[in-house]
Image (cartoon, coloured by chain):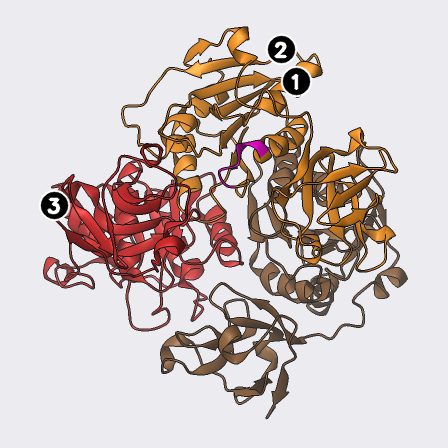
Chain colours: A orange, B brown, C red
Amino acid sequence: MIVLFTDFGPAGPYLGQMKAVLARDAPGVAVIDLLSDAPAFDARSSAYLLAAYAPEFPASTVFLCVVDPGVGGARAPLAVSAGGRWYVGPDNGLFAIVMRRAGAARAGAPKVWEIAWRPERLSATFHGRDLFAPVAARLARGESPPGDQRPAERVRTMAGADWPDDLARIVYIDHYGNAVTGLRAETLDAEAVLRAAGHDLRRAAGFSDLPRGAPFWYENANGLAEIAVNHGRAAQDLGLALGAEVEVVNQ
Amino acid sequence: MIVLFTDFGPAGPYLGQMKAVLARDAPGVAVIDLLSDAPAFDARSSAYLLAAYAPEFPASTVFLCVVDPGVGGARAPLAVSAGGRWYVGPDNGLFAIVMRRAGAARAGAPKVWEIAWRPERLSATFHGRDLFAPVAARLARGESPPGDQRPAERVRTMAGADWPDDLARIVYIDHYGNAVTGLRAETLDAEAVLRAAGHDLRRAAGFSDLPRGAPFWYENANGLAEIAVNHGRAAQDLGLALGAEVEVVNQ
Amino acid sequence: MIVLFTDFGPAGPYLGQMKAVLARDAPGVAVIDLLSDAPAFDARSSAYLLAAYAPEFPASTVFLCVVDPGVGGARAPLAVSAGGRWYVGPDNGLFAIVMRRAGAARAGAPKVWEIAWRPERLSATFHGRDLFAPVAARLARGESPPGDQRPAERVRTMAGADWPDDLARIVYIDHYGNAVTGLRAETLDAEAVLRAAGHDLRRAAGFSDLPRGAPFWYENANGLAEIAVNHGRAAQDLGLALGAEVEVVNQ
C-alpha cells in the first residue's frame, strides 16, 4: 500500500500526476490519499500529524510525503525505514517524529537512505512526481532504496532533531473546525487543562457528553489532544489558527 | 463495490483512514467516493440525497454512510438491506428514505440489523473507521451483518419515520452554485412553480433552453428538482442557503 | 488508464457517479483524477492545460474530459485520437490544442469521431456520466468509437481552430496561489519578461533561487510559464485573476 501525505490541496493537478507515475511503476498496488491538506510548507506541524496517523497502517506501507518548501534547493531526498514502514520525501524534519517514536518503541532503530538516483527528467519544482513517486513505487515493489544509508551520527543531527516530543501548538484544523494539537493525549493527565487563545479547556470523552456550544478537549481517534466545541466550530468560535500556541496547565 | 457517502469534506485525514481499513479488510473491492460534502451533521437532508443517488448503483453495492453528529452517544450502528443494496451507518434517519422507497417499490421490505460487533479498539469519535468500515468490508465480501435483525415494529418507528416522502427544502448546493431540493421532479407537474427566497421559478428542460441569467428549475440527473441560473450561480444570485424552504405553487 | 479532467470541483456527487459507470463498464482499469477544478465553463483555458498535462501519460490513455457549458445543447459529443491517446468529451474546443500539437509533432494527424451512440437514459445535464463515461470505458477496453469519423475539412474548422498556439492569459491558479499561464516556456527567451497586472516579472529557475517575497516566472513541471512569489501567494500578492492577460515583453 502506498499512502499519500501532501500539502497539495484536494484539487489541482499534482496528486493525479503522482498517481499516474505510481500506476505506471507499481501497477496494482493500492494507493490511498491520507492527507492532501497538510499544513502548507510546514514540515514541523506535518511531522506530528504523520506520526499520529502512521501506526495504524500495516507493516511495509510506503508513505509518500510531500511537504517540501525547499524543493529544488539543497535539501536531500530521503527514504526512511521506521517502525516497519517506509517514508519517502524531503529531508526537512518531516520524518523526525516518526523516527524518534520508532526508536523509543524499540521497533528497531530507524534507518535513513539518501536517494542518489535521479530521473532522466527532473523538474525544479515537482520532485513529488519526478523523484519521490518512482522511489515509493520501487519500495512498494519490494526493492531497496536507490542510494546509500546515512551513518548514524548524521541521522542524529537531522532536521527536527531538536523538536519537542510533543508540540504544544495547533497543527491542523479539520473540516468541522476542530483544532488538532501536536500533543499526544496519553502524555496529559485526566485533569489537564489546555489554555489556547485565552480559553481554558477541560477534557471530555467525546461530543455526546456535553451541552451544545460547550468547548472542551478530548483524545481524538489518532491519539492527539483535539479542541472542539459541541455542535460548533472550535477554530472560529475560540479564535484558534493553525500554529497557535497551546499551554498545558494543571498538569 | 463500496460507495462512500460522508460529510467529512473533500480534504482531511478521515476518508483516507476509512479507505485504509477497506483495503485491509476487503482487498480488491472497488471503493468509490460518491459524496464527501453531504450536509454536515444533517442526516435529514442527507437522507433525500442518498435516496436520489442510490438507484443507479448495481445490486449488492455497499453504501458506507457517515453523517453522524451523535457519534459516541446512544444511537445504534446499523446495517440495512433495501432494494437489493446494503447501507451501513448510524441510526439517525440517514436510511429512512431509501428504506421507505424500497418498501413502496415492492423491492422487498427493507431489513435492518443492529450491529452488535465491536472492534478491539473503538474510538469515541470515529466509528466510520473503527466500526462501520469493517462491517461494510464484511458485507462486500458476501458475509452477513454481525448482529441481530430488528423486529418489524421497531423498524416502523425508527428515526425519520415521520419525515415527508419529499423534502421541500434545499438539501445541497453544488460546485456551480446550483441548489438541489429534496423534491423528486416526477412528483411535480410540468407547470409547477417553485417559490424560494421570494423568487418564483418555472420548469425548464435544461440550461441550453434559456437566456443567460435566467433562473429556473429542472429535473437534475438524479431525478431531483434543482434550482439554477443559466451561466450564473443560483445559490448566490437568488439568496438560497442549505436548508432553505421551497414552496410548490400552481401544482 | 482512464484520466478524468473536469470542472466538477473536488467535492460533490458528479465524479463518483462517473467513476461508478467506469467501474461497471471497464472493471479493473485504473482511473485517475487529473484535474477536478479546471476553469469552470472555460473550454479555452482548459484546452491549454490539458495539452500541457497530456504528453506525460502513456500511449492509449483515455482522457475523459468534461468542461461542458453547452451540455444538452447542439454541441456534438466527440472521441478524438491524437498523439496516440484518446480524448472523449464535448465539441467546444477542449481538444483543439492537443490536436494541433499532435499534428505539428507529426505524431500522425489527429482523428475525430462524432459519437452517434446514445444511452437508453440520457439526462439533459450530465452527459459526463450518461454518454462520455460509457464511451471512455469502451475505448479503454480497446474497442473503437461508436460513430463516424469526421471528414478532414470539418476537422479543420472545429471550435478552437482560431485560438493561438499559446495563450497569453492566466489559465489556472493553484493551491499555493501560483498563476499558471497558457504560454509554453520553451517558446519564451531566457530574458523574456512577463507583464501581468502591472508587474514586470523575470524568469528564474525555481523557488530556491530567490529571496522571500520576490515575484518571478519560471517553467513549471508541465512546461508552462508560471508566475509565483517565493513564500507568497502570487495570485493574491500580485492581483492576478483567472483569465487575466499576460504580455510578453523584451522577447
- Label 1 marks which chain's residue? A
User: Mark 3 or mark 1: which is in front?
Assistant: 1
Task: Give the amino acid type for the residue marked by disc 1 in the picture.
Answer: Ala
Residue B146 x/y as whole percent? 80, 41
Discs 2, 3 touching: Cβ within 8 Å: no
Left or right of A127 in this view: C220: left
- Quadrant containing the N terminus of chain C in the rendered view: top left
Mark pair 2, 3: CA separation? 55 Å
Report the side of B239 relative to A212 (left or right): left
Task: Give the class, few, some or many, for how many residues have Cα within 10 Å of label 2's Cα (few <14, many ≥20).
Answer: some
Q: Name the residue under label 3.
A: C104
Indicate the secondary structure of the residue bearing disc 3: helix
Residue labelled with disc 1? A102
Question: Both on one chain, marks 2 and 1?
Answer: yes
The kind of secondary structure element at disc 1 is helix
- Relative side of C158 to A56, left or right: left
Specify the principal SS of the magenta part: loop
First to last magenta residue range? A40-44
Chain of the residue under the numbered disc 3 shown in the image: C
Same subunit, tags 3 and 1: no
Residue linked to disc 2: A109
Residue B148 location (% of width, % of height): 86, 47
Is residue C234 inside the magenta stretch? Answer: no
Q: Residues within 10 Å of mark 3 (few under 14, many from 20)?
A: few
Callouts 3 and 1 close, C-beta under 8 Å: no
Q: Which of marks 2 and 1 is nearer the N terminus?
A: 1
